[in-house]
Amino acid sequence: MERILRILVVDDSAYVRKVIKQMLSRSPFIEVVGAARNGEEALALVEELSPDVVTLDLIMPGMGGIGFIREQMAKAPVPILVVSIASETSQLVLEALDSGAIDFVQKPSALASEKVFEMSDDLIEKVKAAGSVRLTAVKPTPPKPASGSVSGPQPKSTATDLVVIGI
């Protein structure tokens, strides 16, 4: 990795924001450039700070994580790493991934324990991986005309083929 990744941490807990910042600062390739308490504040900070990656809690007062992901992806896509106490098979996490989040790290329910250090290495690796992802806005393709109906020249297709392989 040649460049330093700029990270925005979004979580309603001041303690969690502090712990995540400390975890990420263990890597010389990561700089936390800001922190937000909820989705509304995060939208403003993404626009102001232009982070390379956003770490995002899902359950927050006001605009939660899902609302933030949807609005941010519609405005200007940015790699988002969900960091939540929810399990990776929970409906909320699956909805976040469907809405455009890149990956997921599960927070231990007791952050002041040794489990934090296990999460730390995983978090750093996933932030670095997310930082290498380049997102572009995906425009919906126009609906195809009903079969048999031809009404003049057809527009050139702008659809993009995409293959995603996850491990």
Image (cartoon, rainbow, N blue to C red):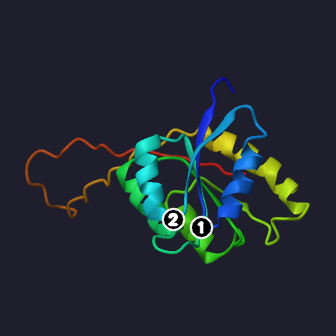
Q: Residue at x 73, y 41 (%)?
A: 25
Of residue 105 and residue 136, the one placed in the foreground of this image is: 105
| Residue annotated with mark 1 | 12
Observer-nearest of 119 and 47: 47
Outermost top residue: 2
Q: Quadrant of residue 156?
A: top left
In the image, taking residue 57 as reference, residue 135 lies left or right, namely left
How far across and down, in percent of the image, does residue 80 sit?
A: 56, 52
Spot occupied by residue 4 in the image (x, y as percentages of width and height): 63, 30
Count up the numbered dots: 2
Query: Badge 2: how crowded within 10 Å, few (<14), some, or many (20+)?
Result: many
Q: Amino acid at mark 2?
A: Asn
Q: Please, is residue 119 above or below residue 28 in the view?
A: below
The residue type indicated by label 1 comes to Asp
Q: Are marks 1 and 2 in contact (CB under 8 Å)?
A: yes
Residue drawn at (66%, 75%) of the image = 90
The first of marks 1 and 2 along the sequence is 1
Kindly identify the residue that appears in the image at 54 percent across and 40 percent down. Answer: 52
Quadrant where the image shows the N terminus: top right
Side of 61 where 48 appears, left or right: left
> Residue 143: which disc?
none
Q: Is residue 9 above or below residue 84?
A: above
Disc 1 crowd rating (10 Å Cα; few below 14, some 14-19, many 20+) is many
Q: Please name the residue shown 71% across and 63% down the image.
A: 15
How far from the left and from the top, in percent, is residue 155?
A: 19, 44
Looking at this rendering, what residue extends furthest in the right direction?
Answer: 114
Residue 86 drawn at (x, y percent): 69, 73
Residue bearing the label numbered 2: 38
Q: Of helix, strand and loop, which one carries label 2?
A: loop
Secondary structure, mark 1, is: loop
Gap between marks 1 and 2 measured at Cα: 6 Å
